[in-house]
């Protein structure tokens, strides 16, 4: 029997607002700020302290929900999710449960067999927990340090339907989602800093069956690679179980990055009973539809829309368009270069960006907003190429120097005397020199060895370090040799 993987993802993304979700503490970089330096009675769970909803966080959440084409609920309700853990000072997390901020969205992803629609179940707001650091002493006694700088930071949870069927699809979904929230300006996308975390729900079923199989939930996945590996591991593990006549047990798993295997955290019997109930300290969250409409009208163009527009506008292949449209900075760079010189061929420009500039980006680590060559400078360089004032080989050398020292193309070309020679009097005299230096070749040519024309061509090029306009040279050479033959 053949099995199919079924995957649903829960994505947690921090909303990088100035202040936390329910208090005025600043949102700080955990790797920079001293522990517990951004903490107040509200986020440290002091008795009697009251939360206040952060409007900017709601706006950020709405941006994401709108970008995912969700239905926005005018009224949503915050709820208490009760559990005990040292990083949760209140003993409960304020979240949303029965009445989330938004539902029924979707995100299209690219798969091997084309575009695929992944439905979004819900998008809701909650608060992050603190961070624990576990320390083991030399004598094997242990203790934990608690940093509450992250406690109370706004967190968005985006829950998909179980619409993905491979680790690759889950990866594509997660990456597309990261790109969107980054471009919406609500999250830096810095995975190393833990600002986006995943939980993967994984089950298998016989291919063709519509009922869902028993699922496991893998917690605390922090990288795309880790998530994909964990999913692959689980699918293999579950398939082996079922093939051996055993059943998959519903449980919560962790991912052991070093052993590269999933490990049991708790079984269904030990599952938390969170005893959700509406948060008594907060009113229902009511969003004004005019405000929502305003946020919607101010959404930036997102990667998929940009791909469609650029594909139609520049008539490049889908692969090439993807390379230019997927990343906002690259698309801006491409379009600013074209704007600097509208006569520039989009195809030529695309070749230069996906060729030498991508290579430079890999080599230098500079992004397109950091590289020293401004779009209008690249446009100028390519104008010289288009007008055959310099050839492609020379232009690559010039570009490299532009990238290193930021000088304009014209300056570098002049400095090295790179201009292509197009003056026919000069070209003719170069040809005559080459002919007079090679009397044997000339007589061979005159007595019928036609192919020597290419050899003469090469000799002139060699003398001038490839700086003669090839078309002009070829024509001039032909004229000159025809004359010789008539003599
Ligand atoms: P919980 O609140 O316990 O995490 P949910 O019903 O909210 O449970 O589901 C969470 C995620 O699990 C969703 O992304 C959903 O698509 C996914 N999911 C549900 N059932 C399955 C299944 N049988 N196989 C894979 N994923 C599933
Ligand atoms: Mg879950
Ligand atoms: Zn606080």
Image (cartoon, helix red, strand yellow):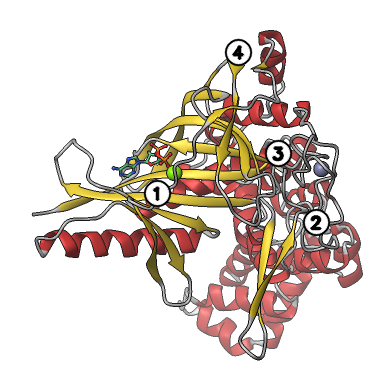
Q: Position of residue 87 (x, y in %)?
A: 66, 55
Specify the quadrant that holds the C terminus. bottom right
Residue 27's tag is: none
| Disc 1: which residue | 271
Residue 186's tag is: 3
Disc 3 versus disc 1: nearer the observer: 1
Disc 2 versus disc 4: nearer the observer: 4
Dot 2 or dot 4, earlier in sequence:
4
| Disc 2: which residue | 370
Q: Position of residue 172 (x, y in %)?
A: 45, 48
One can see residue 434 in this view: yes
One can see residue 346 in this view: no
The residue located at (61%, 63%) in the rendering is 474
Disc 3 versus disc 4: nearer the observer: 4
Alpha-carbon span between mark 3 and mark 4: 21 Å
Query: How many other residues sit within 10 Å of disc 4, few (<14), some (14-19) or many (≥20)?
Result: some
Alpha-carbon span between mark 2 and mark 4: 42 Å
Q: Determine whether the residue tagged by mark 2 lies in a helix, strand or loop.
A: loop
Q: Determine whether the residue tagged by mark 1 lies in a helix, strand or loop.
A: loop
| Disc 4: which residue | 74
Alpha-carbon span between mark 2 and mark 3: 22 Å
């Amino acid at each position: 029997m053949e099995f199919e993987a079924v995957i649903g993802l829960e994505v947690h993304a921090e909303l990088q607002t100035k202040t936390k979700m329910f208090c005025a503490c600043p949102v700080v970089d955990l790797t920079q700020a001293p522990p517990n330096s951004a903490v107040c009675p509200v986020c440290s769970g002091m008795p009697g302290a009251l939360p206040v909803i952060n409007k900017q966080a709601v706006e950020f959440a709405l941006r994401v929900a709108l970008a995912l084409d969700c239905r926005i609920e005018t009224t949503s309700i915050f709820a208490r999710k009760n559990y005990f853990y040292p990083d949760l000072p209140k003993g409960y997390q304020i979240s949303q449960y029965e009445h989330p901020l938004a539902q029924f969205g979707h995100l299209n992803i690219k798969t091997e067999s084309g575009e695929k629609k992944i439905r979004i179940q819900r998008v809701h707001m909650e608060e992050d927990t603190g961070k624990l650091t576990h320390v083991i002493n030399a004598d094997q006694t242990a203790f934990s340090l608690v940093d509450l700088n992250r406690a109370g930071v706004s967190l968005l949870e985006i829950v998909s339907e179980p619409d993905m069927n491979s680790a690759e699809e889950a990866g594509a979904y997660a990456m597309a989602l990261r790109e969107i929230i980054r471009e919406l300006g609500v999250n830096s996308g810095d995975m190393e800093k833990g600002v986006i975390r995943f939980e993967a729900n994984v089950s298998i079923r016989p291919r063709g069956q519509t009922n869902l199989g028993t699922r496991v939930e893998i917690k605390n996945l922090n990288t795309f690679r880790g998530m994909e590996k964990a999913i692959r591991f689980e699918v293999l593990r579950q398939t082996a179980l079922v093939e051996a006549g055993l059943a998959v047990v519903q449980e919560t798993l962790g991912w052991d990055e070093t052993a590269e295997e999933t490990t049991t955290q708790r079984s269904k019997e030990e599952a938390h009973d969170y005893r959700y109930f509406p948060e008594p300290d907060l009113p229902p969250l009511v969003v004004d539809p005019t405000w929502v409409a305003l946020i919607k009208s101010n959404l930036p163009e997102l990667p998929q829309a940009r791909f469609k527009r650029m594909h139609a506008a520049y008539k490049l292949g889908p692969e090439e368009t993807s390379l230019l449209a997927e990343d906002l900075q690259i698309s801006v760079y491409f379009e600013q270069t074209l704007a600097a010189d509208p006569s520039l061929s989009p195809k030529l420009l695309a070749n230069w960006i996906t060729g030498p500039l991508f290579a430079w980006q890999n080599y230098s680590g500079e992004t397109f907003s950091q590289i020293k060559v401004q779009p209008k400078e690249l446009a100028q360089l390519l104008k010289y190429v288009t007008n055959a004032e310099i050839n492609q080989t020379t232009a690559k050398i010039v570009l490299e120097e532009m990238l290193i020292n930021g000088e304009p193309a014209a300056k570098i070309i002049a400095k090295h005397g790179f201009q292509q020679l197009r003056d026919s009097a000069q070209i003719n005299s170069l040809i005559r020199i080459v002919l007079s230096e090679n009397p044997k070749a000339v007589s061979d040519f005159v007595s019928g060895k036609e192919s020597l024309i290419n050899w003469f061509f090469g000799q002139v090029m060699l003398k001038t370090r490839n700086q003669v306009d090839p078309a002009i040279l070829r024509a001039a050479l032909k004229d000159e040799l025809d004359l010789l033959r008539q003599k």
